[in-house]
Amino acid sequence: MTLNELKLENEGKILNIECSENIKRRLLDLGLVKNTNIIPVLISPSGDPKAFEVRGTLIAIREEDTRKIEIKI
């Protein structure tokens, strides 16, 4: 399952990130590492990006990047 499929307020756990190296490095620096819990909490009015709670912080991630983040529920 990928992060874009996770419903609002449901919790998932990051398994793998398959983005380009630049994006992957930024996501890792923001704390999106393997086995980290992540919860989608907000959707922008246009639907992209979505805000996710990670380690007590809200992080906005674009739809195209959420499709490349593998999670488990």
Image: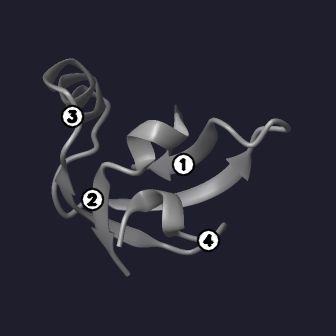
Query: Which amino acid type is shown beneath numbered disc 2?
Result: Thr
Per the image, label 1 sits on a secondary structure element best described as: strand
The CA span between labels 4 and 1 is 11 Å
Q: Quadrant of the C terminus?
A: bottom left
Q: Are marks 1 and 3 in contact (CB under 8 Å)?
A: no
Q: Which numbered disc, 4 or 1, marks the residue that appears first in the sequence?
A: 4
- The single residue placed furthest to the right in the displayed view is 45
Would you name the residue on which mark 4 appears?
A: 7
Query: Which amino acid type is shown beneath numbered disc 1?
Result: Phe
Per the image, label 2 sits on a secondary structure element best described as: loop
Q: What is the count of numbered marks?
A: 4
Residue 45 is situated, as x and y percent measured from the top left of the image, at: 85, 38
Per the image, label 4 sits on a secondary structure element best described as: loop
Q: Are marks 1 and 2 in contact (CB under 8 Å)?
A: no
Q: Which numbered disc, 4 or 3, marks the residue that appears first in the sequence?
A: 4
Per the image, label 3 sits on a secondary structure element best described as: helix
Q: Are marks 2 and 3 in contact (CB under 8 Å)?
A: no
- Given residues 68 and 42, the one toward you in this image is 68
Would you name the residue on which mark 3 appears?
A: 28
- Residue 36's tag is 2
Quarter holding residue 40: bottom right
Disc 3: CA contacts within 10 A as few (<14), some (14-19) or many (>=20): few
Would you name the residue on which mark 1 appears?
A: 52
Judge from the rendering whether residue 10 lies leftward or rightward of residue 41; answer left or right. Answer: left
The CA span between labels 1 and 2 is 12 Å
* Residue in the image at 30% along x and 52% along y: 69
In this picture, is 32 found above or below 1?
A: above
The CA span between labels 2 and 3 is 11 Å
In this picture, is 58 found above or below 15?
A: above
